Image (cartoon, rainbow, N blue to C red):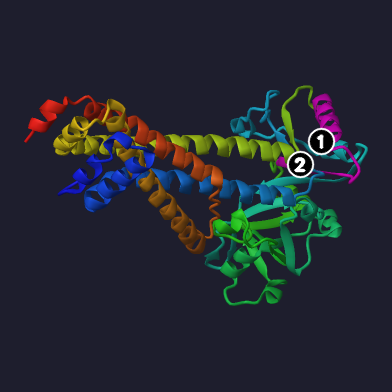
């Protein structure tokens, strides 16, 4: 506060209320705009970080949930290893290593009641190539003709999928992703890619079909590939070419009217009977969503904690500037006390100024986060969902910073002796 403005407020000191405190704070902030902005910078950065990163976490959760729900509520997946414990905790390391799933497990699950489809999923350690061109990001999976019933986010856009005859004859045929086809055959239309041949290691495969993601805004397409770099060959063919081909997942489809929880328990009991140990995990759609939600929630909490550091730094900046303001306005404090202002009048005035400063920084941070979400969405095709909970958290953080770091300067101002304050030069 400079010039005669403090004296305009002195006459209302006895009747000081919250509105007067806020008005005083706004005048002080506006009078020294540059200093106020620099003071708020830590709050602005912290709030923008919190809202943007929480929004990014919510966006990822939304995209992943969308992908999982596309699988259908009657789809289950069997994984080797005890990935999920009885209390629901998730241990991904349990699935690392040699798979315990076998062809006998696939046959046994096909014989269980209320199951309409079972498919093994394997991997081939090979990169599709054509001459000197290679689709280096492609994952080559081994499966059966009913693969698309389980991975419903994919759709066939050219040719056909692998058939029962391909599986029976162990045919060297392959279905490739749209991106892989574009990499290996640049400028060639999808329909013309069908029938061409590619190399997988030393073996030549004929392309019988092309697939792509059915939802172009999916998480996988956001990562840079509309098909996730996927190619599929018959499981029997992969097994014939490499006897060490392992089943790393088994997809199970229950009938529409079946209780998925009952099916899950029956599969677990059958596998335990076959293996003689509880060494597999059966995931339903709800289990997958629960695991994803737990992981992303932990990440979000860690992000909020790290972002809070910026708010603490901003709070220290506010405290320093408020201490300077107390020193600069010592005579004003003395004059106000001389005409009847109490300890609480002075305390509320300076504490309100600290809170207003912090909330202004928070408001600017929210605006920056909104703009950042639009830019990220347009440039990187990532979903950022800024909800009212994130804004509320950031606002409460800002309010808390204003109160905590403004309290010491406010108390210091309120405790000043009016005589000493009036003598201050």
Label 1 Cα neighbours within 10 Å, binned few <14 / some 14-19 / many ≥20: some
Q: Position of residue 72 (x, y in %)?
A: 78, 48
Q: Position of residue 375 (x, y in %)?
A: 46, 61
* Residue 50 pos. (x, y %): 45, 43
Give how far apart the Cα atoms at labels 1 and 2 are: 9 Å
Q: Quadrant of the C terminus?
A: top left
Q: Can residue 311 be spotted in the picture? A: yes
Label 1, secondary structure: give it.
helix
Q: Residue sitting at 33 percent across and 40 percent down?
A: 21
Residue 331 vs residue 404, the one in the foreground: 331
In the rendered image, which residue does mark 1 sit on? Answer: 105
Q: Is residue 202 visible?
A: no
Q: Image point 26% across, 31% down: which residue?
A: 341
In magenta stretch: residue 69: no
Q: Nearer the viewer, mark 1 or mark 2?
A: 2
In this rendering, is residue 394 above or below 381? above
Q: Tag 2's secondary structure?
A: strand
Look at the image and give the residue range highlighted in magenta: 247-274
Question: With respect to residue 249, does 70 lie above or below?
Answer: below
Quarter of the image for residue 305 reads top left
Q: Does 4 sit left or right of 80 as displayed?
A: left
Q: Sort mark 2 into few (<14), some (14-19) or many (20+) by Cα contacts within 10 Å.
A: many
Q: Residue at x 32, y 37 (%)?
A: 16
Identify the residue under disc 2: 250
Of residues 371 and 122, which is closer to you in this image? 371
């Amino acid at each position: 506060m400079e010039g005669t403005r403090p004296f305009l407020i002195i006459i209302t000191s006895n009747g000081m209320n919250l509105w007067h405190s806020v008005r005083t704070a706004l005048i002080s902030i506006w009078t020294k705009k540059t200093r106020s902005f620099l003071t708020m910078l830590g709050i602005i950065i912290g709030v923008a970080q919190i809202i943007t990163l929480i929004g990014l976490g919510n966006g990822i959760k939304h995209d992943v949930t969308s992908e999982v729900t596309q699988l259908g509520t009657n789809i289950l997946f069997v994984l080797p290893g005890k990935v999920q414990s009885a209390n629901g905790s998730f241990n991904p390391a349990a699935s690392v290593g040699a798979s315990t799933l076998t062809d006998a497990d696939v046959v046994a699950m096909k014989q269980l009641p209320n199951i309409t489809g079972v498919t093994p999923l394997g991997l081939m350690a090979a990169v599709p190539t054509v001459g000197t061109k290679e689709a280096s990001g492609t994952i080559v999976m081994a499966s059966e003709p009913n693969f698309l019933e389980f991975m419903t986010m994919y759709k066939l856009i050219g040719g056909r999928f692998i058939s029962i005859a391909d599986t029976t004859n162990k045919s060297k045929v392959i279905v490739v992703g749209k991106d892989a086809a574009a990499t290996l055959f640049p400028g060639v239309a999808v329909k013309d890619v069908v029938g061409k041949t590619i190399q997988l290691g030393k073996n030549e495969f004929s392309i019988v079909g092309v697939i792509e993601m059915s939802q172009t805004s999916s998480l996988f397409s956001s990562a840079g590939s509309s098909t996730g770099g996927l190619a599929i060959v018959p499981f029997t063919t992969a097994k014939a070419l490499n006897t060490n081909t392992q089943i790393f997942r088994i997809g199970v489809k229950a009938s529409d009217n079946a209780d998925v929880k009952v099916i899950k328990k029956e599969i677990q009991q059958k596998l335990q009977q076959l293996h003689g140990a509880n060494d597999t995990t059966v995931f339903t759609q709800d289990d997958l969503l629960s695991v994803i939600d737990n992981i992303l929630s932990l990440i979000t909490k860690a992000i909020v904690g790290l972002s809070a550091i910026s708010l603490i730094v901003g709070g220290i900046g506010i405290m320093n500037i408020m201490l300077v303001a107390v020193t600069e306005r010592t005579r004003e404090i003395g004059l106000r006390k001389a005409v009847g202002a109490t300890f609480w009048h002075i305390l509320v005035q300076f504490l309100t100024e600290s809170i207003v400063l912090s909330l202004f920084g928070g408001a600017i941070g929210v605006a920056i986060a909104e703009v950042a979400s639009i830019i990220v969405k347009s440039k990187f095709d990532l979903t950022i969902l800024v909800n009212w909970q994130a804004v509320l958290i950031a606002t409460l953080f800002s309010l808390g910073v204003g109160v905590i770091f403004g309290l010491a300067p406010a108390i210091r101002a309120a405790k000043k002796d009016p005589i000493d304050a009036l003598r201050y030069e």
